[in-house]
Amino acid sequence: MRVLVVGGGGREHALVWKLSQSMKVNEIFCAPGNGGIRQMAECIDIKAEDIEGLYEFVLNKKIDITVVGPEVPLSLGITDYFEKKGLRVFGPRQNAAIIESSKAFSKELMEKYKIPTASYKIYESPAEAKANLSEFGFPVVIKADGLAAGKGVIIVDDLGSGIKAIDSIMEEKQFGEAGNRVIIEEYLNGKEATILAFTDGITAVPMVSAQDYKRIFDDDEGLNTGGMGAVSPALHYREEMSAEIMETIILPTVKAMKYENRSYKGVLYFGLMLTDKGPKVIEYNCRFGDPEAEVVLLRLESDLMDIMEAVIDERLDKECIEWKEEAAVCVVMASSGYPGSYKKGYEIRGLNSVVDSMVFHAGTKFIDGKVVTNGGRVLVLSALGKTVADARENVYKDIEKIDFEGCYNRKDIAKT
């Protein structure tokens, strides 16, 4: 089987790595790929958003299945386009990917189908948003409606900070068109957890739990990022919660999308807050999380291609998915300045000295025989261990062996 993985980050490197273990897969391409993926797949210089270019490549190379990693091509309708051409593709259609591409849609869906979430209001006018900023008290959460690479959420503690955040999103367009509308919602107290689920639109099969660390600095301080590390299982998640989450959140969401004629097939991401009133949805994503994929896929025992085909063919109920008992931890090595501006092109040293971790490349390039930095999140080191503490020790031991100019990583991943 010939497979094309669309995307070029740490998530896509993890997908390529896992798919390469399948007995069904004998050739993998990745568009555009990166400096690490090139060691496992043939990287193709086509952007993830270039749907027509990807289609031509799939046709010419006789690709059997296309696996879409990032949210942007899904929100642009790559699945619809490919399916209309008779091609097999893993990822939700455009009218289902809206569950991530519009936070307003997802909040209204949860309200309509009584899926537990925070109280909220949607605003299209900056003046109206500012006038109602204190409706839910402080702290309060302000979200850009559209796609913002995981950075479009700002938590503010007072009126002045809230006004600045609204101006930044809606007036200054910090996140571009994603900020045409904002959602203001109550701040939920509790511990965060992520549950990813495979679904074929009828059956949903949850994966092992994970926990993401969004803030740039230790102790969850600083700006939101695309994620600075993750742990699986989530530290505050208890297995007895799984039945409640399945009954009140996962299955109702899959059924709601079907009722709305938006049947969802692919990976559905549930960002949860574990509150004293039970689990509540913070956000949905229409794909594998990043860096959650880098810990969850490390723990997947089953053949990923078998699962993906079962999803495409709507026979997920026949698939038995198995997981490793070991824990997994990953830590992101980022460029200085991220999630703001940063420089690229620095040589990465020490990659061959890593012993206990998988090194997933997130923002790298191979130039003149060297791997250099090419993004804000540069590398994701992921390791297994008998316990979370063991996995954590393995990762941080290997991080010390890698270096590049301006390198930064959090020191407290998987501690709390």
Image: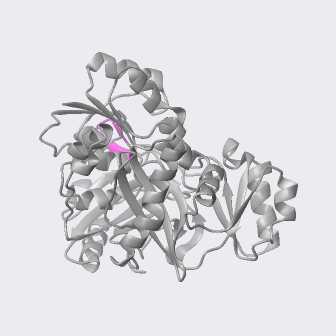
Locate the N terminus by quadrant: top left
Name the residue nearer the viewer: 319 or 360.
Answer: 319
Q: Can residue 350 be seen in the rendering of this structure?
A: no
Place of residue 77 in the rendered image (x, y in percent of width and height, measured from the top left): 50, 32
Residue at (43% x, 32% y) in the render: 79
Place of residue 282 in the rendered image (x, y in percent of width and height, measured from the top left): 56, 64
Which residue in the rendered view is the most extreme toward the bottom? 276
Q: Eyeballing the image, is 383 above or below 152?
A: below
Q: Can residue 298 be seen in the rendering of this structure?
A: yes
Place of residue 249 in the rendered image (x, y in percent of width and height, measured from the top left): 47, 63
Place of residue 120 in the rendered image (x, y in percent of width and height, measured from the top left): 70, 64
Give the colour scheme shown: one colour
**Quarter occupied by residue 188:** bottom right
Along the horizontal axis of the image, is 324 left or right of 57? left
Residue at (47% x, 66% y) in the render: 248
Instruction: State whether the magenta stretch is mostly helix, strand or loop.
Output: strand
Residue at (37% x, 67% y) in the render: 210
Q: Eyeballing the image, is 143 above or below 414?
A: above
Along the horizontal axis of the image, is 48 left or right of 11? right
Bounds of the magenta segment: 365-372
Along the horizontal axis of the image, is 41 left or right of 371? left
Which residue in the rendered view is the most extreme toward the front? 259
**Quarter occupied by residue 308:** top left
Q: Eyeballing the image, is 107 above or below 229?
A: above
Q: Eyeballing the image, is 100 above or below 249?
A: above
Residue 368 lies in the magenta-colored region: yes
Residue 273 lies in the magenta-colored region: no
Which residue in the rendered view is the most extreme toward the left? 23
Locate the C terminus by quadrant: bottom left
